[in-house]
Image (cartoon, rainbow, N blue to C red):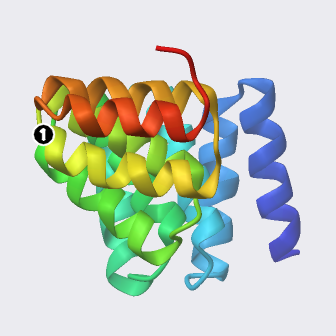
Amino acid sequence: MAKNHLEEALAWLQQGAFTDAEIAARQYTAENPDDGQGYNLLAAALAHQGKSLEAQNILRDALVKLPTNHKLHHNLAELLSRNGEAAEAIRHYEAAVDLAPDNLASLTALVNLLDRAGNLPLAIKYLTRQVSISLEIHSLLHLAEMLRHTGDIAAARSLLLAHQIAL
């Protein structure tokens, strides 16, 4: 029965029936307090209803029980970022990346938030990691542009030349 509540919550969420998704997710988390999926679905249902602060609190409470769940950290960071709480969002994205170093979604979101916050040295650090995991032209160009903004034109040029990208 418990698995059915999770499946129901996901189905309701996909159909846009957010109140029903919330009810099913609450039932699932009550029956499975050690499963982060239920908390993530519950937070999504709440956020879609405009209850962002409640969704954040659900994820914070879940992280007390499940501090090594990178998806909980990532989703909390997403909510915090949307609400303009960049410093705390950065901490949770960093936790997500530390727990799942190859998670490109968390890395990309962290790099973008750090870039918007003007923290280029840290953004460069994480973007370098992202490029080492997934060599995409957009990421290489983004990294080269960040290096150029910090005044390290030689490093930007070397990066582009190493990957045979025309200047």
Could you tell me if residue 42 is visible in this image? no
- The tally of labels here is 1
Rendered position, 31 above or below 129: below
Residue situated in front as seen by the camera: 18 or 36: 36
Residue 126 placement, left or right of 165: left
Could you tell me if residue 130 is visible in this image? yes
Residue 27 found in image quarter? bottom right
Rendered position, 114 above or below 71: above
Determine the residue positioned at 50% across, 51% down.
130
Determine the residue positioned at 25% across, 34% down.
154
Residue 83 found in image quarter? top left
Residue 53 found in image quarter? top left
Residue lying farthest to the top in this orientation: 167
Determine the residue positioned at 56% across, 46% down.
105
Q: Position of residue 167 (x, y in %)?
A: 46, 14
Rendered position, 148 above or below 40: above
Q: Position of residue 36 (x, y in %)?
A: 58, 71
Which corner quadrant holds the N terminus? Answer: bottom right
Q: Amino acid at mark 1?
A: Asn
Q: Position of residue 39 (x, y in %)?
A: 54, 62
| Residue at disc 1, secondary structure | loop
Residue situated in front as seen by the camera: 6 or 82: 82
Residue situated in front as seen by the camera: 80 or 39: 80
Q: Disc 1 marks which residue? A: 119
Residue 106 placement, left or right of 110: right
Determine the residue positioned at 32% across, 50% down.
56
Dot 1 alpha-carbon crowd within 10 angstroms: few under 14, some 14 to 19, many 20 or more = few
